[in-house]
Image: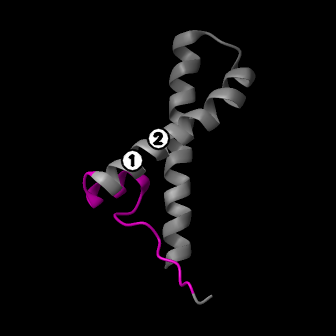
Amino acid sequence: MNLLVSLIRTGVPALAGWLVVLAARHGLGLDAQALTSVLMPVAMFCYYTVFRLAEHYVSPAWGWMLGSPRPPQYDLAA
C-alpha cells in the first residue's frame, strides 16, 4: 500500500505541473520545448512543496491535493 501511495503522491504533482505548463504555453507564447523543460520541474516542485507543507502544518486533509490523505509510512526495520 505504501508503494501505491508514494506513486500517487508523485504522479499528482507531475500532472499539476504539466497543466501549469500547458496554461503558460498558451498565455505567454514561449517556445514549447524550452518552456516545458524549465517550467515543468519548477511547477511540480512548487505544487508539491505547498501542499506538503499545508498537510504538515495546517491539516492532514491537504494531502488529498497530492492524491492521498496521508504520506506513505515506511518500515524502519527494512
State yes or no: discs 1 and 2 in contact (Cβ < 8 Å): yes
Query: Left of 29 or right of it: where is 1?
Result: left
The spot of residue 2 in percent (x, y) is: 51, 76
Disc 2 marks which residue? 47
Q: Residue, x 62% and y 28% (percent of image)? A: 39
Q: Quadrant of residue 68?
A: bottom left
Tell me the magenta residue range: 58-76
The spot of residue 19 in percent (x, y) is: 51, 34
Which kind of residue does numbered mark 1 sit on?
Answer: Phe
What SS does tag 2 mark?
A: helix
- Which quarter shows the C terminus? bottom right
Q: CA distance from mark 1 to mark 2?
A: 6 Å
Disc 1 marks which residue? 51
Is 21 in the magenta?
no
**Mark 1 surroundings: few (<14), some (14-19) or many (≥20) residues within 10 A:** many
Q: Main secondary structure of the magenta part?
A: loop
What SS does tag 1 mark?
A: helix
